[in-house]
Image (cartoon, rainbow, N blue to C red):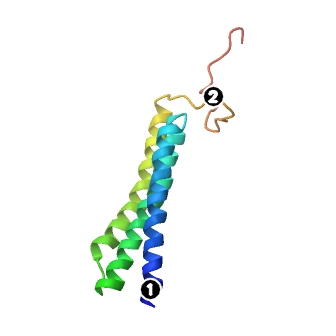
Amino acid sequence: MIEIFRIIIVALILIGAFLSLVAAFGVIRLPDVYTRNHAASKAATLGVLTVLLGTFLYFYVEEGHVNSRVILGIVFIFITSPVAGHLISRAAYNSGVKLWDKSVQDDLKTKENVPAKKGQ
């Protein structure tokens, strides 16, 4: 039974490392601030959460105690990272950072935000 938990722990940590690597590539390769922020807030959060979950299971199975610091880390990352990503994207949009030009539809743009064309 212990071997199954060890395999699960290793799998969680490897999946978390892979997701963090994907997030790093996303931040480097994606075209605009909004997609980069999406990669950082989604993939990196999931990567860190799976690594912390693997760490929690390791301490629980191997050492035999519940590590409250890891639980607090999981809760803190789970709550703060998506909120911070949303606020950064909102601040970028409100400050006028342009969207990626290719096939992106701006659903937040309203009639008041659109400048009037000449002759209208």
Give the distance between the C-alpha atoms of the residues marked 2 and 1, in whole angstroms.
51 Å
Q: Residue at x 71, y 12 (%)?
A: 120
Residue plotted at (44% across, 45% down): 87
For the point 66% across and 35% down, the residue is 104
Q: Which residue is mark 2?
A: 101
The residue at 66%/31% (across/down) is: 102
Query: 24 or 104, which lies in front?
Result: 24
Q: Nearer the viewer, residue 35 or 55?
A: 55
Q: Residue furthest top?
A: 119
Say what amino acid the circle numbered 1 marks.
Answer: Glu
Expressed as whole percent of the image width and height from the top left, the position of residue 98 reads: 54, 28
Specify the farthest residue to the right: 119
- The amino acid type of the residue labelled 2 equals Asp
The correct choice, above or below, for 17 with respect to 117 in the image is below
Seen in the picture, residue 72 relative to 61 is either above or below; the reply is above
Closer mark to the observer between disc 2 and disc 1? 1
Depth order, front residue of 101/95 = 101
Comes first in the chain, label 2 or label 1: 1
Pointer 1 residue: 3
Residue 86 position within the rendered picture, expressed as x and y whole percent measured from the top left = 47, 47
Asked where in the image residue 74 lies, by quadrant, the reply is: bottom left
Indicate left or right for 39 with 101 as reference: left
Relative image position of residue 67 (x, y in whole percent): 29, 77
Dot 1 alpha-carbon crowd within 10 angstroms: few under 14, some 14 to 19, many 20 or more: few
Q: Is residue 20 above or below residue 94?
A: below
In front here: 101 or 22?
22
Res 30 → quadrant: top right
Horizontal side of residue 61 vs 47, given as left or right: left
Name the residue furthest bottom.
Answer: 1
